[in-house]
Image (cartoon, rainbow, N blue to C red):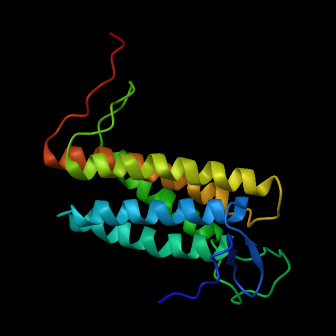
Amino acid sequence: MYTRGGDKGETGLYGSKRVAKDSPRVEACGTVDELNSCIGVSLAGSQRREISEELKWVQRKLFVVGADLSSDYQAEEKPGRQPRIVEGDTKKLEAMIDSYHAKLPHLANFILPGGSALSANLHLARSVCRRAERAVVSLAKKETVNPELLPFLNRLSTYLFNAARFSNYIEGIRDEVWEND
């Protein structure tokens, strides 16, 4: 399907608002979409149900992030009108982080991204998540955004880091410590 609506460098946001495809809002939405695709690649290589179920939840929430970013945020809007990331979503990520942290050995050094294929893909997703977070910070300097988006994305990158470490841990692969040669 094609509409030709974007042939002149504009795209539609939620509702009828049109913006340039290189606007900060579209950049943030696109980076979140890329992050969701990275998580899809991670899922394609995952044989671990405990990680896969969490990643599927994350993917569903990233669609909410995208919907949240593709519409103007009004703090006084009626609840339920537009999907939004809420504090409870961030709290759920924190609980998932705490669960992994309790199972993993203490980390006192930087580690190189990699190990198992799943771990390497999760590290890639983590780095794209950090870029999405930076894109939302840039957008928030120009337009009002849901204040829950930044804590959610910040915790998500931490979750992805711990999920990557946990993936290596359950596969019996040691994280490789960075050494300055």
Q: Residue furthest right?
A: 76
The x and y percentages for residue 157 are 49, 50
Q: Identify the residue at horizontal 68%, vertical 60% (top origin).
A: 22
Q: Residue at x 72, y 61 (%)?
A: 23
> Is residue 103 shown to the viewer in this render?
no
Q: Nearer the viewer, residue 155 or 102?
A: 155
Q: Is residue 101 left or right of residue 81?
A: left
Q: Residue at x 74, y 62 (%)?
A: 147
Position of 2 with respect to 87 (left or right) is: left
Q: Position of residue 154 (x, y in %)?
A: 58, 51
Q: Quadrant of residue 29?
A: bottom right
Which of the pair 64/124 is nearer the observer?
Answer: 124
168 or 59, nearer to the observer: 59
Residue 44 picture quarter: bottom left
Look at the picture and state if 41 lies above or below 75: above
Q: Nearer the viewer, residue 28 or 101?
A: 28
The image shows residue 2, relative to residue 175, as above or below, that is below
- The picture places residue 89, in percent across and down from the top left corner, at 56, 68
User: Residue, x 22% and y 44% (percent of image)?
Assistant: 168
Q: Is residue 31 depicted above or below 11 in this figure? A: above
88 is higher (above) or lower (below) than 156: below
Q: Position of residue 145 (x, y in %)?
A: 76, 65
